[in-house]
Image: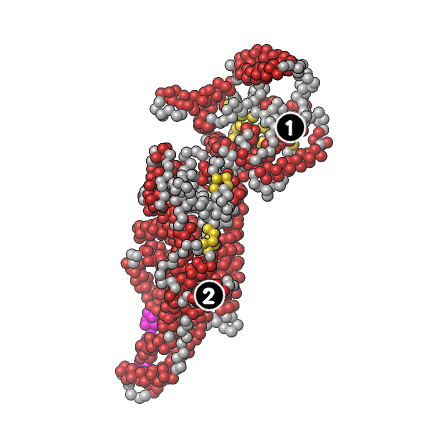
Amino acid sequence: MQIHLDNLSRQNLSGLKEKYKEIQKNKSQKKEMADVDHQKKYILDLDRQISDCSLGLEHFLRELGQLYESACYLPKESPQRKQVEHLPGLCAQMLLDGFSVELVDGDASNIPLKWISAVLTELHTIVSSNSKVRVVTVLGVQSTGKSTLLNTMFGVQFAVSSGRCTRGAFMQLIKVNNDLKEELKCNFIMVIDTEGLKSLELAKLEDSYEHDNELATLVVGLSDFTIINISMENSTEMKDILQIVVHAFLRMKEVGKKPVCHFVHQNVSDMSAHDNNMRDREKLLEQLDEMTQAAARMENKENITKFTDVMEYDPNTSSSYIPGLWYGTPPMAPVNAGYSEAVNDFKKSLIQGFRKCQKTENVLNFMIWTKSLWQSVKFENFIFSFRNSLVADAYTRLCTEYNRWEWAFQKEMYSWIMCAETNILNFGLTGQCTTAYTIKHMLCDLKIEASEKLSLEEKKILDNLARYFENQDGHVSLVEKYREDFVASAKTLRRETENKLMDTLRAAVEIKEGMAKLNEIKSSHANTLEKKVLALLQTCRQKKSDLSDQDLREEFEKMWEETLSEINFSGLPRRDVTLVAFNVLSGHLSTRGSHVSSMLIKNDLVDCGRTRFEVKSGSWMVMAKDLLIHKDPNHQRNELQNICDNIIERCQEFITQRVQNKSDFHDTYINELFEIIDETLQKKKCKVNEECEVSLKLHICGIAAREFQKMHDHFITVNDPRKCLEQSKNKYLNDFIDLFHERDQCQKKADEFTTLCLKPAVLDYVTKMIGPDVVDEMKKGKASENFSTRVFFQFSILKQLLTEGQYDKYKQYISNYEQFVKQWLFDLIVNQLSNESTLEKLEKTHLTEIVRIITDAIVAVRNTTSTNKDIKTLIQNLCSSLGDKLVLHKDALDSIMTLNYSEKTDQFADSLTEFVREMELSLEVKYIHETDITERLRSMPFKPQDKMFTSLFGCGEVCPFCSSPCEAGGKEHSKHFTSVHRPQGVSGWRNKETKVLVSNICSSSVISDNRFQTPLSEDKYHPYKDYHKYYPDWIIAGDPSIEASDYWKYVMATFNEIIAKDGGALPAVIPEDWKDLTPEDAMKSLKGSFNVKD
């Protein structure tokens, strides 16, 4: 059939070409204007006839494809549709049989995606699913021998005869022999031949839909190996094609595709051209560099200055020179044998070049990539688009792995800091404090150790990241451009963790130093009393008569009163926390000028923070995220109110956490509150006026001063030296009586040590260690995928909102996203831990572990009999052994050590072991009866809800147009993006004049002619297409398809009236197709947007 069509074309074309020559000959003669116009029309008609005569097999296959595409819109059970369902299978078999199939329709400049997808899917089914495909494409100017080159190299039969030039792009499949599969790492080679490129002036890409640009970008994006075919006869032609090619390669760099590039120079007269044209190759590279710089400026990628920044290109190895095919003028001229030899040499270099190519794909992945790439080409969307499922999968896998490495880092460092903090708080407990080695020396040692530990754990993340990108599985090349973002995130993680570690170590040392003077006073009093008791004991024993317990009590009472009257009780002085807080605030704002000073003087800190903080109108200077001026007039005040409420809540959490530590007040607590306030305002890109800032800080200082004053007063009361002694009176008395009667104290001391020291320490240990386990439980539980990446996290939130269908929930999600996410996470954790007594099991696991450590320590200390002179020494050795696990309270330990002189260490160890077992059983019962999971979560030092929020909330940035949260992985990503943009009317935006809610969607706006306004633009409007000039950190993928945001279209249509009434606006004009959307359509759109498979 193909031969018959060629014959028909030749018969008709000959006559038409003769007519064409005749017209051109007459055209050179002077004619009247009317005749000239007639000739032009006749030439156009001849051109059309010549084109119509160029009938080939591809035209019939194209018709089959269009029949199939049309049938796809019929119902699945339609007889007409069933009649054409076998066509893709036939076409796939033709591909396998060596026929070329049209990929790009040359007349319509379009890829029939349904037809091509069906053909490639059938092909994937016919060949084994693990069959790999290498793609080779050729680009060049028209009629420069591209098809002839491919035919000669691969023995294929792309159309070159009958005067027809290739239109569009054709693909042909070549099966690789078994002996070459291993070398080429593929089962098939897909050869794509394209129509010729024409000259094209550099133009701004946002305004350009030129056919050649589209075609070049598409074939470069599809290929593993791109052949740039250049005719040496025309330097202007060469420059034109290079302009197009550079643009294509630059775009592919942005999406992670890196085809190998090879230049073929045809019609070279001198076969030694490769050796003699070194200067020409250097000149070519200079031209490529110039064009790269020009293209980079147009693509807003000015950091790219050389062609080698885009491609791995070596002018010496990436260029081939091929002589002309004919000696003389065809058709009677003989064939040039040197052409075949040069092509064969080039073929060998091409096979070598396959080794540099990225990982091969199967046919199905090639089809997916083709579909997504074509969408990007049509809408000039060459930035990273997460509508591309292959890229989305690759990025999701990378984010999942990085989150796993990050969590391992955080767990390891939390474990380390708990151990270090415990060592600090236990410092000096058993006598390791000396003049040569103080708590300051320990702090220095721990800082060095922390730095080494952080470097080790950071290196683990970076090594894992390097190994991940070395492994070619999972399309890692598609996200190569984001590698540095994750490297930067790892370094930021280390830096932030180091800052927190150092703050924690310093805080622990401050607590220890703050207690030092108090402990010194207590120890002095205890030593005095112990001496008095021992003296009284000696006196009573010297008396001849036997003394009853009542007599002993009377003697003890006399001694006690005398001793207390002799001791000078000087506890800690009471501080005025309100005055301290005011002085710290004044120092913090000392550089702000007289106006701020007068504001501070006018306000009494005692009265601040007693009522709800309210933002006054005009309190803001700049709200950086407000882009449109047609919002509710109270919008800026409400936005700032939400920010201030969030700051106050964070500060209250900080205050509560400090109060729960039951330590003394420290001035640095107030400074830490100011850091929280300033950091949040900076992060929210909100600059408030001085009055608002001062009022907010006064409000928070007032709250903090009252809470910290209570904490300080309670600390002084609890640690009053006289009161502490009075509390120990009965213990001193009982020990005195036991010593007088020489009773065995082993069992009693073991009970006291377990109850007063070990049990509180064990409870504290389990509470500290349980937090990371809760996070692990959430990450490994039934809904673990929801917490693996920010994308899945967003999907799970939006899915639940859709399922519940409540406007109030949507309103909270949109207006106060951070608070909504925190509460949503907390509720999920509570629900998960409520199932099957999960929290109780985790607590028992840690309880069992620490009890085992304690019993092992008892055995180990007991066996070192040479150092255990008495029970007191044994306890000291045991405390040293447990010093990095349990925080042992000095008061309780000193109380047990006092008047403890028994030498029955084995008996004490046996009793202690038994009491530890009883303690374990009693704590197990305690955990069973504690059912308030909410309170237990909030009492944990390591709060799992906060840690998960920090990980999943991300950078906190939102879309500048619709406020959808950023979903990019890592913390230091250079670009922000979100999978689903929402209509701006959902957030309350309305038209300035009509007050009607707007229904624009960002993904549609950025490829439209609409304009936006920023608060700093002074009534100037800017095209949405230029949004990246004003918000360069954001990527908004243009997508005009109706499926792009069906989820939010459904929400907007469903709650349109409620949103308008709630915001004092008029309902939006909802398109009819939005009203027809169902919850099922919304869910389907949501899954597609987030690339979630059923």
User: Which residue, as the protein is rendered here, is positioned at the far bottom?
Assistant: 544
The span picked out in magenta is 739-753
| Front label number (2 vs 1) | 2
Question: Which residue sits at x=31%, y=83%?
Answer: 557
Residue at image x 48%, y 71%?
433
Residue occupying the point 59% across, 42% down? 302
Amino acid type for the residue under numbered disc 1: Glu
Secondary structure, mark 1, is helix
Q: Which residue is mark 1?
A: 237
Q: Nearer the viewer, residue 620 or 319?
A: 620
* Residue 742 forms part of the magenta stretch: yes
Residue projecting furthest to the front: 993
Which picture quadrant has residue 868? bottom left
* Of the pair 15 and 790, the residue shown nearer to us: 15
Q: Position of residue 1041 (x, y in %)?
A: 43, 33
Mark 2 or mark 1: which comes first in sequence? 1
x then y, percent, for residue 328: 70, 18
